[in-house]
Amino acid sequence: METYLGEKQQARQWSPYINNGGSCLAVAGDDFAVIASDTRMSLGYSIKTRYSTKYLKITEKCSIVSSGMQADIFTLHKVLKSRAQIYEQKHGKPMSTDAVAKLVSRLLYYRRFFPYYTFNIVAGVDEDGVGCVFSYDAIGTLERVKYSASGSGSSLIEPVLDNQVALKNRNDIKKEEFKLTKEYAIDLVKDAITSAGERDIYTGDFVEISVIDLNGTHEDKFELRFD
Amino acid sequence: MQKGGFNFDLYQRNVELIEKNNYKVPKTTKTGTTIVGVVFSDGVVLGADTRATSGPIVADPNCEKIHRISDYIWCAGAGTAADTENTTGMISLQLELLSLSTGRSPRVRTALTLLKNFLFRYHGYISAALVLGGVDFTGPHLHMIHPHGSTSTLPYISMGSGSLAAMAVLETGYNSKMGEEDAKSLVHQAILSGILNDLGSGGNVDLCVIKHKSMEFFRNIDTTNSKRKFRKKLPYMFKSGSTKILEKEIKEKMEKMEIVNEKENEIEELEEL
């Protein structure tokens, strides 16, 4: 259908997917990992709820955060939780972080032709006690990294982590001399997601942040802007 | 030479860029916005939030959306930021010239007519939704103007993406016998409702109270929603040398200037004409 200016207007097709917004990130240190996500669920210009969790603790050593469509996040987390429970009961021990990472990848690829609209990040400590972060795309491409951000605020957060964690484009500190401490990582994660909350309309309300180390998981929550 | 109006020289090129080169049309800064106006016993109160968005990103967290048309006629604008600013600026100019040539203080209904005629000429392509309020010698007035050029005269108005949130508050709280403090408080609550519940609105509350020969502008009367909740204690430090220097070029500062061409004669020629 052409308008009088010659622009073509396409008929709107129904889509099974919607984006509920929100940002997630995770940073891995030598023997710990920090993982965080905001809790705002939006639709268009409205806020559906200020508290809808995007975080799931899978084992004491491994957690996942997901952004994207809340319905798919909820379902994926439900499936993941039950699969982890089945594994633990069958094998008599909790899943290792590497196994969880691979499981998430398989669960996502299983839905290759009608994907979960979720952008996941898995973080924890691996079998050697080293902090790890795994990032995925919607269909389960798996990559182990030192840090990752996903969601509507990811383009605001990722460059900060590139500069402050990977020390990219910096000539004042050498990589060998830099040690990522737990306090530094927690402060950085909190600061990064707060900054995303300032400039991204879909990020805000509350943040669930959790620190995973060899002693287990410590969960915390803090406030962001409500506007 | 083109006199006034808009320049359409690049139209053909833009159409071709979009169709053949898959060029993406740049996003305009919209004001998302919640703007509100309420009439009370002695005048009008205008209110606005302060967030300007460019898609899902906040372009300006503290912009001014209440524009001056004349001393006692003010206008809050929603829609494309450039459109609201330039439209209100142009009409303010025209109104000033008109008031000087007629020797009379400007009326709100004149500003209304100028604005609606201007916007109608552009058939909605100028995306400016305005809440015009003011007090002239005929009394207090409040109008809403849509981008296509239609207007309404009402005792309370809300516009912008947060208009539904604001209107819910206005409908609940408005009564025709309100005084200044009640009206200010109602407008404040309406804007807050937009700021908290609409993602296109946010930041601080701006208020403007106009009475007979009196105008009070409360810029950022409420900043409780725009405070950053967490800031890490250690600042971001970049020591000298953080950015790699690729090339260095030092230019000598010019101490003397040489006069190459003198053009005194040109001025004399003009005077003769």
Image (spheres, rainbow, N blue to C red):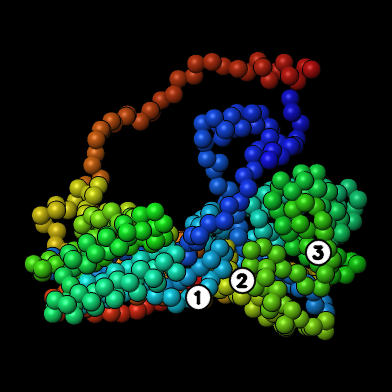
Front disc: 1 or 3: 1
Query: x, y (%) of residue B6?
Result: 71, 36
Horizontal side, residue B102 vs residue B210: left or right: right
- Foreground of the two, B111 or A111: A111
Q: Both on one chain, marks 1 and 3?
A: no
- Mark 2 lies on a secondary structure that is helix
Q: Which residue is mark 1?
A: A49
Task: Tell me the subunit letter for badge 3.
Answer: B
Precedes in sequence: disc 3 or disc 2? 3
- Mark 3 lies on a secondary structure that is strand
The crowding category of the residue bearing disc 2, from other C-alpha atoms within 10 Å (few below 14, some 14 to 19, many at least 20), is many
Q: Which label belongs to residue B143?
A: 3
Q: Is residue A107 above or below residue A57?
A: above
Q: The C terminus of chain B is located in which quarter?
A: top right
The crowding category of the residue bearing disc 3, from other C-alpha atoms within 10 Å (few below 14, some 14 to 19, many at least 20), is many
Q: Is residue A158 above or below residue B229?
A: above
Query: x, y (%) of residue B48?
Result: 65, 67
Residue A215 appearing in the image: yes
- Foreground of the two, B15 or B84: B15
Horizontal side, residue A62 vs residue A5: left or right: left
Q: Which residue type does callout 1 highlight?
A: Thr
The crowding category of the residue bearing disc 1, from other C-alpha atoms within 10 Å (few below 14, some 14 to 19, many at least 20), is few
